[in-house]
Image (spheres, helix red, strand yellow):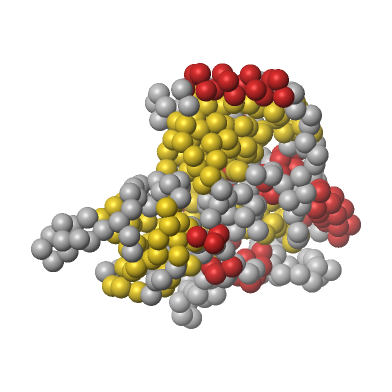
Amino acid sequence: MTSVLAPRDGAATSLLRFATAGSVDDGKSTLVGRLLHDSKSVLTDQLEAVAHASRGRGASAPDLALLTDGLRAEREQGITIDVAYRYFATARRRFILADTPGHVQYTRNMVTGASTAQLALVLVDARNGVVEQTRRHAALAALLRVPHLVLAVNKMDLVGYAEPVFTAIAEEFTAYATSLGVPEVTAVPLSALAGDNVVVPSRNMDWYGGPTVLEHLESVPVGHDPSAEPARFPVQYVIRPRTAAHPDYRGYAGQIASGVLRVGDAVTVLPSGRTTTVAGIDALGESVDVAWAPQSVTVLLADDLDVSRGDLIVPAAAAPATTREVTATVCHLHDRPLRTGDRVLLKHTTRTVKAIVQDIPFRLGLDDLARHASPGGLAANDIGRVVVRTAEPLALDAYADSRRTGSFLLIDPADGATLTAGMAGDAYADAPAAVAGRGADAAQADSAQADSAWDF
């Protein structure tokens, strides 16, 4: 089997995680297929299989959308249903791509694909312009704090490559994204089917002087300084060998979620609040003086403290406050509705605690950003504000400060199903004014109900 996978001129030096989104039939799968094909990132046998499948469907040329529409149901219906992950590389960068569905029924799948993305690429059909699902996906990208947003105006060949069409769509979308607090939008006119401005610059749009899609993906900055964030180390496992060689060894293993840990740092263990210092750090079987996110290491502490899975080791001078009342913006993922009073499990990093849904102040209409007060519950794909009371204290950062330690999941305690994805703190960078609450009496009644239901 012959492969033409890049990189061709040496190893790629950085990694970009990005997600594609857009309305149904805007051409996401075709764009991804074109991107993989034209960047020489498709295995020969894969391309032959796509060509064979295309001929079986009566197509005269390979349908590049089949490179990502892998499910049988997707190929039969011509839509994307599940998140399709693809890995490819060029000489400049490695990529992990999440091709997310466009149908409103599968909006929750975009939350899955974009939750770890550093860039979101939202497609628009040049004939239809910005539609409701376009605004919904832009709102989700802003909600998930995806650092970079790209507008890909597709099917420009079907509007005669007209510059005014592209300009009008780009201005409308940018204005909407700005209202969500998105700092910058990069707009690219293209035709995924013809290959215009995907990898190779288009001769049909000489009025456009910006980068192609691939050029932008290769050049967008993704690096960050770990020392700019406070250290967060969720304990995953306690290592106690109890051997002759290591009779007193007690190490705490896990992955550094953010920041930098150094030997000698004064740290606090949450939620207990006990303080000590970092006595040692083991990485890949060797002792090191410093480690940073996202390295997986074993941390040794100077004092014998009661530390277990789910505890959070943080700098003593930059410890987050612990709380048993979590207010967050959430996306409900399950077909089973989430309602006020529901008993759930809340999973935050490596810690899982009992909790109860104390209040759902509003549901967010992503088409117009209107807040619908006191909805009583959230259905699948709904975005809303939720107040959750936990049985044990949690140490959460605001999601705006840390996507890792500001996020959590709500889980059904009966069957372990994931119900809801939550983001602590404000929803958007420029969040609109909150709707009026239901009053202090109602809030106190909810709190009393939560305490009596779970005895905490």
Residue 436 horizontal side relative to residue 318, left or right: right
Q: Give the percent coordinates (x, y) of residue 250.
A: 26, 58
Q: Quadrant of residue 128?
A: top right
Q: Nearer the viewer, residue 68 or 267?
A: 267
Name the residue furthest left: 244
In the rendered image, the quadrant that contains the N terminus is: bottom left
Q: Give the percent coordinates (x, y) of residue 40.
A: 51, 67
Q: Give the percent coordinates (x, y) of residue 163.
A: 86, 60
Which residue is found at the position 69% from the left and 28% from the top?
361
Residue 159 visible from this viewpoint: no
Which residue is found at the position 65% from the left and 27% from the top?
360
Residue 84 horizontal side relative to residue 45, left or right: right
Q: Nearer the viewer, residue 109 or 268?
A: 268
How many numbered discs, if any? 0
Which residue is found at the position 45% from the left and 65% from the top?
266
Q: Give the percent coordinates (x, y) of residue 272.
A: 43, 47
Q: Is residue 57 shown above or below 251?
A: above
Which residue is found at the position 81% from the left and 49% from the top?
179
Q: Nearer the viewer, residue 115 or 188?
A: 115
Residue 213 visible from this viewpoint: yes
Residue 275 horizontal side relative to residue 114, left or right: left
Q: Nearer the viewer, residue 206 or 443?
A: 443
Q: Is residue 26 shown above or below 377?
A: below
